[in-house]
Image (cartoon, rainbow, N blue to C red):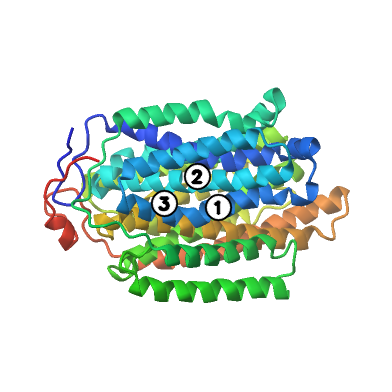
Amino acid sequence: MSSPASPAGTAEVPKNIRWVLLGILLALLLSMLDGLIVGTAMPTVVADLGGLDHMAWVVTGYTLATACSTPVWGKLGDLFPRKTVFLTSIGLFLAASMLCGAAPSMNWLIAFRVLQGLGAGGMAAGAFALIGVLLPPRERGRYQGLVAAVMAVGQLGGPLVGGFVTAHLGWRWAFYVNVPVGLVCVAWCWITLRVPAPGPRGRAVVDWRGIALLTGAVSAFVMAATWAGSVYAWGSWQIVSLAVLALALLAAFVATERRAPEPLMPLRIYQGHRNFPLAAVLLTVSGVSLFGATLYLPLYQQVVQSASAAASGLLLLPMMIATLVASNIAGKVMTATGRYKVFPVLGSALLVVGMGLLSTMDTGTSRFATSAYMAVVGAGTGFTLQMANTIAQNAVDPRDMGAASGATQLFRSLGGSLGVAVFASLFTGAVAGGTGGAAHVAAVAHATHLIFLTGALTALAALVAAVFLEEVPLRGKPGAAAPASARTAGAAPAE
């Protein structure tokens, strides 16, 4: 059946939208879980396949492929039927999962993980783009808690699922488990998903030069962030060369996008309204804070507070619950009033305070205090992350929804990669002198102090960006502003 387009260029919200969203979000959950499940299974993988010296590439290859492919999949969704592109990315992910599970050696596993990352990039970009075209920004708050819940489950459940599956079924099932869940997702989306077409399309022109240049720039950046402070020193010629290469390719990419007939990442999404680049800053900085908290809080709890590995994962619950509560509150208020700027301002301020409180932890900090500090960070994340996505999508023309969604996910990934690199370097330097016993415990406490202090200072950039946001009307209600091309669009058939 056809879905009439609203004056804002988005479809009227289907009555069964929650069921439709569950299928879309299942794909997003799979892409998030897989990156965390495999990390837990890696010691068993190495024991079976060997290749300890290449182990890091099992994770790096996946992360790199996901980051590079996200904007490409997003743009393809703007050029071709969005539903078809989304299902294709899921199919690639599932095929690669089967290959990963059957990998005969570490080298083959790395190659298959790259393919899997390519599919995951499309699943993440496609999920957020579909949410953008199915739900007008003004209506999205009603369902914001559902999206936040899936992301929280992905962050918390990955290590737990990975540990359980590896212990009881073997490491290969860490990949095989994706297949039945993914097939359900494909069938679900095939039956329930009806995507409004963006209007008449001209001949689809793929920006191959832009794809090559952006892939090169992102690859150089991610490799520099991954290797800096661990494999090579920050000031080494290898890291400096990669950084220079990333900047040069980025400059060439921007020049190419100015001339491309159908650019991979249209510069108009940055130039049209200041809210999009400001939302990108919010997502990048929030990515740094979130990765720092989820990676190093469990380590602090295990080493300093003597929590077990399983318990340290569950001890993140206060942060995840606070994220869900804050996201729900922000969404309901946004839908009811149309007001939203207060939430990223409040959320980024809570991130600064929460990360600052975490930086005060030492060897004598109680688990209750740690949980309270985590809840502050979680509330900040809940008020910021989903709202920043909505603000970014509201600031662009609906025809650029895929490109904008791919760009925002890329910024978040790059922020996470840079954060992990900086935090890992701080941690390594701080614990270098702790050789064992109480000295090691004190060194880990000092390392987490430096990490969270850096996170608090970084979160200040998010606060500044939030203050400069402009509260423009959200699309989806009478009287809401919309881009000119969207206001003149008529009804469009479903893809």
Which of these two is toward me, 413 or 350? Answer: 413
Instruction: Point out residue 32 in the picture as x, y percentages from the top left corner.
Output: 52, 42
State the mark number for residue 65. 1
Q: In the image, what residue type sits under mark 2? A: Ala
Decide which of tag 2 and tag 3 comes sooner along the chain: 3
Task: Identify the element where label 3 is drawn.
Answer: helix
Residue 413 position, x and y percent, is 52, 55
Q: Classify the position of the C terminus by image quarter.
A: top left
Q: Earlier in the sequence, mark 1 or mark 2?
A: 1
Report whether residue 353 is seen: no
Residue 194, position in %: x, y? 26, 36
Q: Pick the residue in front: 8 or 256.
A: 256
User: Around disc 1, counting alpha carbons within 10 Å, would you say few (fewer than 14), some (14 to 19), or many (20 or more)?
Assistant: many
- Which residue is pictured at 63% across the width and 62% down the height? 223
Q: Secondary structure at mark 2?
A: helix
- The answer to the question of whether label 1 and label 2 lie on touching residues, with beta carbons closer than 8 A, is yes
**Residue 188 position by quadrant:** top left
Q: Which amino acid, by three-letter code, is at mark 1? A: Ala
Q: Which residue is mark 3?
A: 73
- The crowd level at tag 2 (other Cα within 10 Å; few <14, some 14-19, many 20+) is many
Q: Is residue 480 visible?
A: yes
Residue under pointer 2: 120
Q: Nearer the viewer, residue 471 or 226?
A: 226
Question: Where is residue 322 shown, x and y percent of the image?
Answer: 47, 41
Q: Residue sitting at 36 percent across and 55 percent down? A: 75
Query: Is 121 positioned to the left or the right of 447 in the image?
Result: left
Q: Amino acid at mark 3?
A: Trp
How many C-alpha atoms fall within 10 Å of the one at disc 3: few (<14), some, or many (≥20)? many
